[in-house]
């Protein structure tokens, strides 16, 4: 008796194979891929929505700015140009500190306080990129969950992408877009403390250094240059049994600051104690920043500093463009590979290889 269809279609049944021409038999199938069309957006809509405070359109515009795709970059720059007249009306605050100082906790507590007072707060949080994969965790929205839910706040995590200074190379453009969207306070959280963090000083109005109690060991690893650039040092986690030690640490920092040149002319850098957990001292930090702004506007330092920062930004972008253009050259890449082999084989010195790379014969 012949087997029934039901007996054949068991879990062990093997279906007949699919006929294919992938092994070269018969006429080859060639797929034609259409060229990807250039991205087109409604710029008027984006500008209108960003000016109206749309966080969605602002986030997309920042993505265009940060993109490495040429047509998206062009869109981002064109949007920025249109929005430029609406920028410059915020207080730009850079926040750095040693690992474990509680930067994210401080920023959330500080940002929530400002939002409750009616300010619109944008947080540009920079995460370190992996030197192996280039990826970043970008977990700041998770760490600042309550602030992220506030309608007056905007949090944008971005990868450092190998940029020195603990910021993204497009952080300045991102700040301007946030200002155009009506944000009064821009908080730039950097990767961490270090000599390269000084780049942040060149893009903010007020530079805040977050520190921990027990300054002794911490000061050993903290660069003097960072302390000289700070407009305020804030000792965090001044609560519970740690409160007494925090006051002692503040006193120690005040003594140290007395011997350092101030970051800003006619300004004495203060050391303050705060508890982000219990929201203590945050109002004093904000009053200090407002006092700084008032003083700097009166003596012209505020406006002059921003003009100098714009010129520095211009020079930095020239260097970035030269770097990108150099490494995008096919001829240069080929020359680099050949010279690399010569250097590896100790046939020429490194200096000779670089001279050869930049000579007319290697262009």
Image (tube, helix red, strand yellow):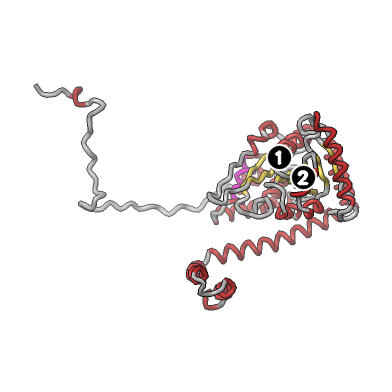
Please determine whether, in this image, residue 344 is positioned above or below residue 158.
below
As drawn, which residue projects farthest toward the left? 1
Mark 2 = which residue? 217
Mark 1 = which residue? 100
Residue located at (79% from left, 39% from top): 213
Query: Total label count?
Result: 2
Residues under numbered marks 1 and 2 in contact, where contact means CB atoms less than 8 Å apart: no
Residue located at (87% from left, 51% from top): 296
Residue located at (24% from left, 40% from top): 18
Dot 2, crowdedness within 10 Å: few (<14), some or many (≥20)?
Answer: few
Q: Which of 261 and 358 lies nearest the eye of the viewer?
A: 261
Of discs 1 and 2, which sits in the foreground? 2
Q: Residue 118, can we see it?
A: no
Measured Cα–Cα span from mark 1 to mark 2: 14 Å
Please give the label number shown on residue 117. none
Query: Residue 229: x and y, percent?
Result: 80, 53
Q: Is residue 118 left or right of residue 125?
A: right
Label 2, secondary structure: give it.
helix
Query: Residue 197: x and y, percent?
Result: 72, 52
> The magenta stretch spans which residues?
56-65
Quarter that holds the N terminus = top left
The picture quadrant where one finds residue 69 is bottom right
Q: Which of 103 and 211 lies nearest the eye of the viewer?
A: 211
């Amino acid at each position: 008796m012949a087997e029934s269809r039901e007996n054949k279609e068991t879990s062990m049944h093997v279906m007949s194979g699919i006929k294919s021409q992938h092994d070269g038999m018969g006429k080859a199938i060639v797929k034609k891929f259409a060229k990807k069309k250039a991205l087109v957006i409604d710029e008027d809509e984006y500008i209108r929505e960003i000016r109206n405070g749309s966080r969605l359109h602002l986030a997309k515009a920042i993505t265009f700015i940060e993109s490495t795709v040429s047509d998206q970059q062009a869109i981002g720059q064109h949007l920025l140009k249109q929005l430029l007249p609406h920028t410059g009306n915020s207080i730009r605050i850079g926040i750095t500190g040693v690992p474990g100082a509680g930067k994210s906790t401080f920023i959330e507590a500080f940002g929530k306080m400002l939002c409750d007072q009616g300010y619109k707060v944008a947080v540009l949080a920079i995460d370190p990129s992996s030197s192996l994969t280039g990826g970043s965790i970008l977990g700041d929205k998770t760490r600042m969950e309550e602030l992220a839910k506030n309608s007056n706040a905007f949090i944008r995590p971005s990868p450092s992408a190998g940029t020195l200074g603990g910021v993204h190379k497009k952080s300045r453009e991102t700040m301007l877009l946030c200002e155009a969207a009506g944000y009064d306070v821009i908080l730039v959280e950097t990767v961490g403390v270090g000599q390269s963090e000084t780049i942040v000083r060149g893009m903010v109005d007020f530079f805040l250094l977050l520190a921990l109690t027990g300054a002794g060991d911490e000061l050993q690893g903290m660069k003097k240059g960072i302390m000289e650039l700070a407009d305020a040092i804030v000792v965090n986690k001044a609560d519970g049994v740690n409160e007494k030690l925090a006051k002692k640490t503040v006193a120690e920092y005040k003594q140290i600051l007395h011997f350092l040149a101030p970051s800003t002319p006619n300004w004495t850098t203060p050391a303050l104690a705060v508890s982000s957990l219990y929201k203590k001292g945050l109002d004093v930090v904000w009053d200090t920043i407002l006092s700084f702004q008032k003083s700097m506007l009166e003596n012209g330092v505020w406006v002059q500093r921003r003009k100098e920062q714009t010129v520095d930004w211009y020079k930095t972008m020239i260097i970035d463009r030269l770097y990108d253009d150099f490494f995008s050259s096919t001829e240069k890449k080929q020359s680099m590979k050949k010279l690399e082999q010569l250097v590896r084989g100790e046939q020429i010195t490194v200096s000779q290889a670089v001279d050869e790379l930049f000579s007319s014969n290697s262009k």
